[in-house]
Structures are given as C-alpha cells and as structure tokens.
Image (spheres, rainbow, N blue to C red):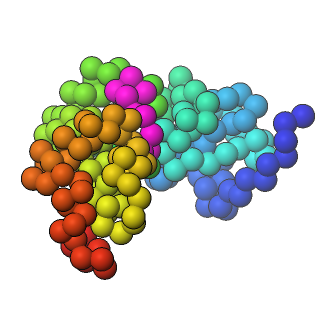
Amino acid sequence: MKSQKVSIIPADYWQAITENDPAFDDQFFYGVQTTGIFCRPSCKSRVPSKENVHIFKNAFLAIEQGYRPCKRCKPDGLQLPTEEWVQQITEWMDAHFTENVTLDKLAEVTHSSPFHLQRSFKQLTGISPFTYLQQKRLEKAAQELATTDQTVAAVGRAVGFSNIPYFITLFKKKTGQTPAQYRKGVDCSGSKID
Ligand SMILES: [Zn+2]
C-alpha cells in the first residue's frame, strides 16, 4: 500500500468536488492518487474516494507531483485564459528561479510547448520568460549582496547563475555597477533595498 499521507480537504472543497461546482474551478484542482489524474472541481467524472484526493492550488503543482491532466475537464494551463496562465507561470518562476530553469523545463512544467509559452508570455508581459527569470535573479542577488557577506560568486550561484562571469556582466549591464561596487555602495543596514 501507498504511505498513508493524511491530506486535509476543506469541507467546502470536498463539497465542490462531489457537487461538481464550477464556482470553485479557479480556486483549486484535485488529484486522485489511485489514477494519477487531476481534475477541476466541476469535472463530471466519478467522485473519487476522499482518502485518495489531493488538493492543489494550481495545475502546475499537480503536474509537478506527477499527475496528468484529465482528458474530460482539461485542467491544464492551456485551457485557462492567457492572463491567468501567464500569472501561474510567473508564480512558478518566482518559486523556482534559483534553480536551473530552462525554457524546456518551463514548458514541461506548464504543460505547454516552448514556442507557445514564449509567445504567450511575451505577448502579455512584454518580456520573455527568460528575461523575467534573469530579473528575479538580479533582484535577489542585489538583496543578498546588500544584506549578507556571501562572496559575489556564492551570491551568483545562490540566485541561479551557474556562470559567474556572466552574472557579473549582466548585473553591471542592468545596474551600472558590478556586484562588488554595488555592495560597497549600500550601507550596512541594507537600506538601499526596499
Ligand atoms: Zn476531470
């Protein structure tokens, strides 16, 4: 048997699942452990056993856990309005930018093609997913430089740059200062960063 992981399902969520309530479709998704499929609350598929149900805040988290989207209610990102979809991608990147996130990886996680992902994201935000990631990394690096005494290389690696000379070059290009110069310019309270 699988390990008995207790998963707490709020009563109103469970009711939404059993009643196929579409009002909850934008609030959560549920995966069924025994089938490996995840659904929208409104899905008309057979109501699963409660102990096999896992709740996910968004479709990507379910996909990350190895669940496949249900063919019937199509809970994957592509079904969402682009705006909401892009927001979910952004949230995912916010949580994972320190890792080695490639466009392929992002496409896999978001259940999309690299082409579709790149185009939709750029249409809505004006920048590519990669540029967004780099911005997050640089912001975080600036914060780390100001508030820790980690070496520049350690900061670069910690925020997701595997190539340190590239990190330094990019940082300088965006802020006008090298990471070391930037650190010097910040007083020790780090008050330059909000
Ligand atoms: Zn379904």
- Picture layout, residue 48 above or below residue 144: above
Q: Is residue 103 magenta?
A: yes
Magenta residues, start to end? 96-106
Looking at the image, the residue that sits furthest to the right is 1
Q: Residue at x 61, y 31 (%)?
A: 67
How many numbered dots are placed on residues in this image? 0
Looking at the image, the residue that sits furthest to the left is 176
- Picture layout, residue 160 above or below residue 181: above
Q: In this view, does 97 lie to the left or right of 183?
A: right
Q: Is residue 51 left or right of residue 134?
A: right
- Asked whether residue 54 is in view, the answer is yes
Q: Which residue is drawn at 61% across and 56% down?
A: 13
Q: Pick whichever, 76 or 23, lies toward us.
A: 76
Q: Is residue 176 left or right of residue 151?
A: left
- Picture layout, residue 70 above or below residue 153: above
Instruction: Give the percent coordinates (x, y) of residue 78.
Output: 37, 30
The quadrant the C terminus occupies is: bottom left
Q: In which quarter of the image is residue 53?
A: top right
Q: Which residue is drawn at 25% across and 36% down?
A: 166
Instruction: Give the percent coordinates (x, y) of residue 34.
Output: 76, 31
Q: Residue at x 30, y 67 (%)?
A: 146
Q: Quadrant of residue 85?
A: top left
Instruction: Give the percent coordinates (x, y) of residue 121.
Output: 24, 35
- Asked whether residue 89 is in view, the answer is no
